Image (cartoon, helix red, strand yellow):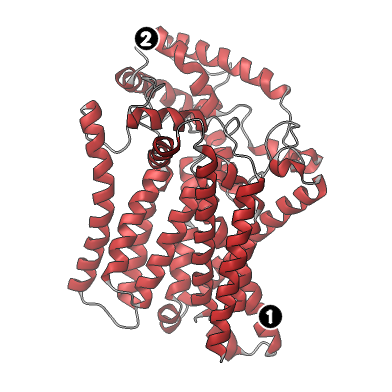
Amino acid sequence: MWRERDRTLFRVFIFAGGALCLFYAIIFRPITFEGQGDYPAYLDLARQIFHLPGATENDLSHRSPLYSLLMGLFILLFGEAHYTIPLVLFQYGLVFLSSLLVYRIVLMLTGRDTAAFIAAFAGMVNLATVFFGYMILSETLALFLFTLSVWLLLNYVKGAGRTAIITAGLVTGLLILARFNMMGFPVVILVLLTIFFIFGEHRCGIRKAATDMSLFLAGLCLVLNGWAFRNYLENGRYELVPRHHLGARWAVPATISPSDTISSEYQPVLDIFLQTRGELLDKERSRVNRQSSLLENDFIRRMNDSFRPSVSGYLMYRDSEEELLRYYGLAKNQEGLRLLNEKLKPFYGQIAAQHKSEISRFRIYSLLYTFKHISPTLAGEDRLNLNKLPSPLLKAYKVLFIAVALLVYLVSLIHTVYLLLRRERIRAGLRWLMIYGLIWYFPVVNWYANVLGDANRFRYPADMLLTGLFVCYLYIAVALRGTGGSKGIMNKQLTV
């Protein structure tokens, strides 16, 4: 009877969740005009890939291509004038599928459909999830692929066999093509698989471990090499992502200031960057915060300003690029940008040497930004989509999600230490350790890459899973309270 009731609850969720996502797709308007400048590049890359009318010769080889491939297919099917509505419907379909995966993951961790139901539903009503569903951006695709990869790995640990690990390799490859900042993710997976092979309930021999990890890598490499081969056919370079944009989003350009001292050969380069810096500072002074921004609070704004750079390093490079190319007499194409990057490396080195403490401060800022909410509103006063929500509700959501993210990461650290104290706990809690390793990828890579204000957007693929883990903790807390904090019950719940 209990199992039948569980199946009934899952069917109820399928119906309710599907209806909610369909409702989102109907009432919200697709947004292309605002999206941190990414949408035009995605569209241009889609035109380039499929050789569609309107394609430019801009170098977009540094762009993650998977979303543009998807956009191109929708353009071919529905026409460029009508593809956005079907694409938004598809994206909310991915949100729904992601929620089903979260349902299964939480069910694996807690063994209770009620907790799984609440966790999956909470992920769907997260305002950031709703927001990215109607934005023509890659975040929803990355959300689905990340959640799917987590589910596949947990199923493999549970004993699903080699089909799961091969598929996990393929999906991880697609995830990297959806977001290039996930390139370090396979390393985390291989480390976690090694822990599983050592501490798993049924110990694996070296041969099985090597074979299964090789199968994972084979699936991964098949996908990534497919795109690298396409790049070879298009531009003669067998590469996944070029190196000529490495300085664009990092923190070093953000530290440039009039007090910097550099060698005479780079003085014109510094002057170009300082001119851009002045223009960006003027724009910053007239910048209007998004609706219901927490930066309206004086304390939060002062704390944020104490860590953040005066100007964006990404914008410093982007807005200086044209002038830098002219100064060096380089064409604005792949080869010209590669040469520009090589010429700027010594300049960046001289700048970085003068701002070591500032760059370290930016790393802290980038790490802290991992836990920040993602604003679910559009810039400006337009009463469109979620901008119609009242300000108190938006602020409450933002504060709540910050609290949820911080709590989940804090508890995950404590729980990891608890599991590592005894070998038998490691064996019993491998699924928890697997998930913790996967979600901690984002703070670590954001700290290392120093992506500053983009850190929360780069963390977004983990949002549904973070919400699901929060519900798991609430369920375990309630269970412990109902049993008077029994030690045996606690061990069972934390290592289920």
Q: As drawn, is 441 to the left or to the right of 195? A: right
Check disc 2: other Cα within 10 Å, few if <14, some if 14-19, many if 20+.
few
Q: As drawn, is 67 to the left or to the right of 493? A: left
Image quadrant where residue 305 sits: top right
* Depicted 60 relative to depicted 164: above or below: above
Tell me whether the residue at label 2 lies in contact with that at label 1, contact meaning CB atoms closer than 8 angstroms. no
**Residue at 64%, 54% in the rendered image:** 23
Measured from the top left, where is residue 179 in percent x and y?
43, 44
Task: Decide which of 245, 252 is in the foreground and name it.
Answer: 245
Measured from the top left, where is residue 242 in percent x and y?
32, 32
Say which residue label 2 marks: 328
Task: Decide which of 81, 149 is in the foreground and name it.
Answer: 81
Image quadrant where residue 135 sits: top right
**Residue at 34%, 78% in the rendered image:** 200
Check disc 1: other Cα within 10 Å, few if <14, some if 14-19, many if 20+.
few
Say which residue label 1 marks: 478
Measured from the top left, where is residue 15 in percent x and y?
59, 67
> Is residue 362 shown to the viewer in this render?
no
**Mark 2 and mark 1: Cα distance apart in space:** 65 Å
> Is residue 277 shown to the viewer in this render?
yes
What's the amino acid at mark 2?
Answer: Tyr
Q: As drawn, is 376 to the left or to the right of 424? A: right
Label 1 SS: helix
Quadrant into which the N terminus falls: bottom right
Question: Which badge, 2 or 1, comes first in the chain's sequence?
Answer: 2
Task: Decide which of 137, 96 is in the foreground and name it.
Answer: 96
Say the numbered circle drawn on residue 423. Answer: none
What's the amino acid at mark 1?
Answer: Val
**Residue at 43%, 54% in the rendered image:** 145
* Depicted 119 relative to depicted 81: above or below: below
Label 2 SS: helix
